[in-house]
Each structure stands twice: as C-alpha cells, then as structure tokens.
Image (tube, rainbow, N blue to C red):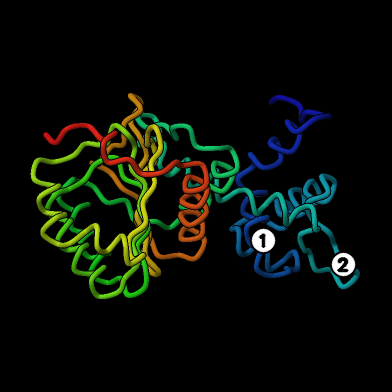
Amino acid sequence: MSEQPKVGAESLFFELAGELRLSILIRLTSNNYRLSKLASEIDATMQEAHRNVSRLIDSGLVYKYDDGEFALTAYGNIIVSLIPGYAFLFSQKEYFLEHSLGDLPSKFIQRISSFRGCEVVHGVMAIIQRWKNLYHESSSYINEIMAQVPLDLIETLGTKVEDGVKFSYIFPRNAIIPRGRRKLLQKIGWHKLIAQGLVKRRMVESVGVMTIFNEKHSCVIFPSLKGEPDLNVMFYGDSHLFHEWCEDYFSYQWERAGPFEESKLDHEI
C-alpha cells in the first residue's frame, strides 16, 4: 500500500479518499459524537473508528473535546462543505462525459454543489412541458437566457406578462427563431408590453448555458461537447441554493449583455 503523502493538498485528498474517514466527516457535520456511537453509525469496530478518527485529528479536520466527544474543526467544516460539489459531479459523471460547462466563469463552477438534489429531466417534450408549467406558476417574474425560441410557448408567456408578470430575457445573436414568431409577437402586442416596462431584453454574442427561472422554480441546460445547448437534458429544482445560482448567473450575463437588436437575429426558419 502506498504511503500517505506528507506535504501539499495531496495529503488532504488522501485522507478524504478513505471510506470510513469520509463517513465520519459527513456525520460530524450535523452532530458531535463519542467514539462508541460513531463506530456504530459507520458500522466499524471501535479499533477501526479510533484509528481513522486519530488520523483526522492529525490532519486538523477533527477535534476531541475533554468530555470525549469528537467534532469538526473550523478548517474541517470548510473542507466538508466543498464535498457536495464533487458528489454531484460524480453522480452525473455519464452526463458530464458528454457535456461541457461552456464558458461558465470559475466562480459559478465552484458553486456546482448548488445543483445537488436537482431533478434531471430527459426529453425535449418533457422539458418544454416543464417550461410551460413554470410560466403558468409564475406570479411575479420570469427570467431566462435562451438559445432557441419554442413557438408554442410565446402565447403562454404573453398571457402571463399581460397579467403583470415581469419578463426579462437574453438572446444570442444566432438564436434559432421559428417561423411565425414576429406575427405572433405582433398579435399579443409585444412592443406595447416592452413600452410598459413589463418586458426587458438584452443580447449577447452566443449562449452556451441556458436558464429559466421564476420566484419558485429554476432550470438549467448545459451545452454538448459541440458547444450548443442540449435540449434533451435539463436540471430542474426549487432549492434556495440552486435558485440563487440561476439568479446570479442571469445577473452576470445581463450586465455583460448589450442592447437587444431585432435586426441582428437570424431569419426565421
């Protein structure tokens, strides 16, 4: 068996690689434990538990109180808080072997644990139905970054905006525009809604990562390895952390986007 690395971050990863040690760290995030209870929780002998806890103490991840209880150190708490990101990526390994994060800034990649617990929705029709439901359930606002414009969603969206729901969206210059979009926008009085401030829009050069969210639910679609959003798979959730990730990413793109120029969009197809 290889000896434990002595220096550098590799020594930390060496400790985290132990199944029993990782189980101990996860349990200590919620409660302090005495050794006997901890051994029972991780299904280990007292000797195994003691040996692994001692290593975690030596690594600075765990502290033993005078009363015999074990707890995470402040350093240990920080390290353990980063584990869910790796856990999410591992759970979606097959997906990320075929998808990229596009040009996603590192500050958003570092928060990838926000996706943990999301439902993975498969199939274009199932995804469009989720978008419809999201529109219908919106009572305050809808924000989205889209690379394509599903025609059958425009009227649903227009109805919600007419009811007072604020809509902000970002298109790329190469957005796929379905035939009949302009006539449909004229029918529902889109430019009037823009003039009333109910609709706001901006434009970027390209879109790799798509997101749609309201005050309750959030969706994210990542690009395939070819760089185009893959509308066959979507992450969907309603957790606070996931919603905050989507809000922050939308704000980031909104700030760097330019004015919306209808004339710059590709022809309808």
Q: Work out whether 34 lies above or below 101.
A: below
- Residue located beneath label 2 in the image: 65
Image side of residue 150 versus residue 107, left or right = left
Task: Kindly identify the residue that appears in the image at 34 percent across and 55 percent down.
Answer: 212
Q: Position of residue 14 (x, y in %)?
A: 70, 35
Q: Evaluate if marks 2 and 1 touch, with contact meaning CB atoms under 8 Å apart.
A: no
Q: Earlier in the sequence, mark 2 or mark 1?
A: 1
Image side of residue 105 versus residue 70, left or right = left
Quadrant for residue 141, please give it. bottom left
Q: Secondary structure at mark 2?
A: loop
Q: Work out whether 92 lies above or below 4.
A: below
Q: How many marks?
A: 2
Q: Work out whether 11 lies above or below 31.
A: above
Q: Position of residue 221 (x, y in %)?
A: 34, 44
| Quarter of the rendering occupied by the N terminus | top right
Residue 220 showing in the rendered view: no
Q: Work out whether 223 lies above or below 158.
A: above
Q: Position of residue 4 (x, y in %)?
A: 76, 30
Tag 2: Cα neighbours inside 10 Å, few (<14), some, or many (≥20)? few
Name the amino acid, label 1: Ala
Image side of residue 267 versus residue 42, left or right = left
Mark closer to the observer (2, 1)? 2
Task: Kindly identify the residue that appears in the image at 77 percent across and 63 percent down.
Answer: 71
Query: Rounded to the nearest whole Å, what is the CA distance between mark 2 and mark 1?
Result: 17 Å
Image side of residue 18 versus residue 135, left or right = right
Residue 79 showing in the rendered view: yes
- Residue located beneath label 1 in the image: 39
| Marker disc for residue 218 | none
Task: Kindly identify the residue that appears in the image at 75 percent across and 64 percent down.
Answer: 35
Tag 1: Cα neighbours inside 10 Å, few (<14), some, or many (≥20)? many
Quadrant for residue 63, please give it. bottom right
| Quarter of the rendering occupied by the C terminus | top left
